Image (tube, rainbow, N blue to C red):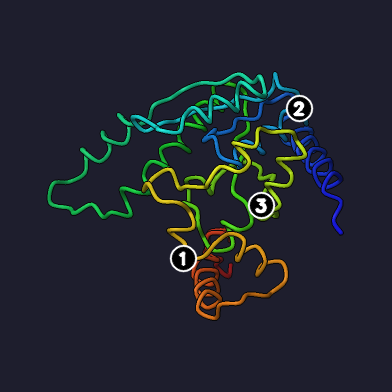
Amino acid sequence: MTDWEKVKNDCVEWVRGFFEENGKGCNAVVGISGGKDSSVTAAICAEALGKDRVIGVLMPCGEQKDIDAAYTLVNHLGIKHYVVNIKDAVDGLLGSMPEDMEISNQTRVNLPARIRMATLYAVSQSNNGRVANTCNLSEDWVGYSTRYGDAAGDFSPLAHLTVTEVRTIGNILGLPPSLVNKVPTDGLSGKTDEDNLGFTYAELDRYIRTGEIDDADKKALIDTKHKNNLFKLQLMPSFEPEL
């Protein structure tokens, strides 16, 4: 039986240690979507560093229907926050593409995530910050992240915790249930994570931790996604000459 209170405390100490070694006195900069991952990450950072050293960044792309959840989080934690609407940046870049080049749907879906990461680093460099990566193990396992978008960052508190475990930590931190249990969506295509993936996080988390899954087709799908997306978790391949 895992002592999740201890896991939470260990994570807090890990974040504290990271900043001692890699940015003593720096601020944690967290992109706030209002979902469990950004909420738990921000709460962990606030406990580790104090709320005065955590900066939340809300980044709607035009009108964001669930932005109230993001405001709930920053108000609950009492952290400083900025709102940066990325719509003009996204539209500007898309509008600057060559007219004879067809822009793929996947490009349109992933571009906002990459613009958001550029925004986080702009805020971070102007506020003596370090950017938090908010991805969890479940998403990383099947490549459900945007390379150089939400998959980027300077430190990653949740990378070895499944969705189920992140929710457990969120409850221990005393976060509002509406945030911890919020139905996860990609915030880009308008679909839920589970719609996009083809299986539930409960099924995925059980498979990750125990190797057990009831549906052979879903097992094959998870295994394929895991294999095909391992490159996202590895360092960029580089040529090493024999000199």
Which amino acid type is marked by label 1? Answer: Gly
Q: Earlier in the sequence, mark 3 or mark 1?
A: 3
Q: Residue furthest left?
A: 100
In the displayed structure, would residue 40 be above or below residue 46?
Answer: below
Give residue 46's position: percent from left, percent from top. Answer: 72, 28
Residue at 52% across, 46% down: 183
Residue at 55% across, 81% down: 216
Q: CA distance from mark 1 to mark 2?
A: 38 Å
Which numbered tag is attached to residue 159? 3
Quadrant containing the C terminus in the rendered view = bottom right
Residue under label 1: 198
Q: CA distance from mark 3 to mark 1?
A: 22 Å
Which amino acid type is marked by label 3? Answer: Ala
Which numbered tag is attached to residue 49? 2
Q: Residues within 10 Å of mark 3 (few under 14, many from 20)?
A: some
Give residue 48's position: percent from left, percent from top. Answer: 78, 31
Left-right relation of 232 to 177: left
Q: Secondary structure at mark 1?
A: loop
Q: Secondary structure at mark 2?
A: helix
- Between 59 and 189, the residue placed more toward the observer is 189
- Between 56 and 148, the residue placed more toward the observer is 56
Give residue 112's position: percent from left, percent from top. Answer: 38, 41
In the displayed structure, would residue 21 be above or below residue 138?
Answer: above
